[in-house]
Amino acid sequence: MYEGFGTEIMPDGKRTMKLPIRDDCMGEISMLMGIDYMLTGNKRSLEISDNLIDFIFREMQIKSGLYKGMIRWTDEAYTVAYTHDTGRAIFGELLKNLYLRRNRYMDEIRMALDFLIETSGSDGARKRRTDITNLNEAKIKE
């Protein structure tokens, strides 16, 4: 899943196409395909939904070390995470788990949420963008 059309509309009516593979775009489409499966029983929709989530947790999530749990924003911004995008990436899988009575990727979802908690301030506030090139153990504790 690509990001899709940008917000810019040129004077001649052309629009730019954004090509990064984004975690939130994949998560949103996965959720919609999962809902389609729940409403229609279309097994192909569930397969697409699961494949998108598989990619997020296999390719976009850091599995160990200081940044364990971080879900990368795009394939072009591999060191960046956005809080709201991480939420949109995983929310659909939580819904599918609830309504389909399964527990796929719950460990990975917990890791993603733990990373967000660990990189939040002591007051619960967090920056909207986390860039691991600016983080180290001391910065995370701070």
Image (cartoon, grey):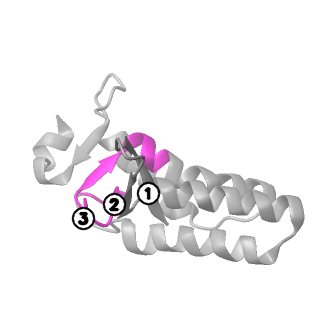
Dots 1 and 2: beta carbons under 8 Å? yes
Q: Is mark 1 on a helix, strand or loop?
A: strand
Amino acid of disc 1: Glu
Q: Where is residue 140 in the image (x, y as percent from the top left)?
A: 20, 42
What residue do we see at 59% from left, 49% from top? 91
Question: Vertically, is 129 above or below 79?
Answer: above
* Mark pair 3, 1: CA separation: 29 Å
Q: Nearer the viewer, mark 3 or mark 1?
A: 1
In the rendered image, residue 68 lying in the magenta stretch gets the answer yes
* Residue 3 image label: 1
Q: Looking at the picture, how far across and down is residue 124, in whole percent?
A: 37, 26
**Boundaries of the magenta span:** 67-87
Mark 3, Cα crowd under 10 Å, few <14 / some 14-19 / many 20+, is: few
Q: Main secondary structure of the magenta part?
A: loop
Do the residues bearing badges 3 and 2 touch, measured as CB atoms within 8 Å?
A: no
Which residue in the protein does label 2 denote? 74
Residue under the image location 44 percent in, 57 percent down: 3
Quick one: 141 or 9, which is closer to the camera? 9
Residue 97 seen in render: no
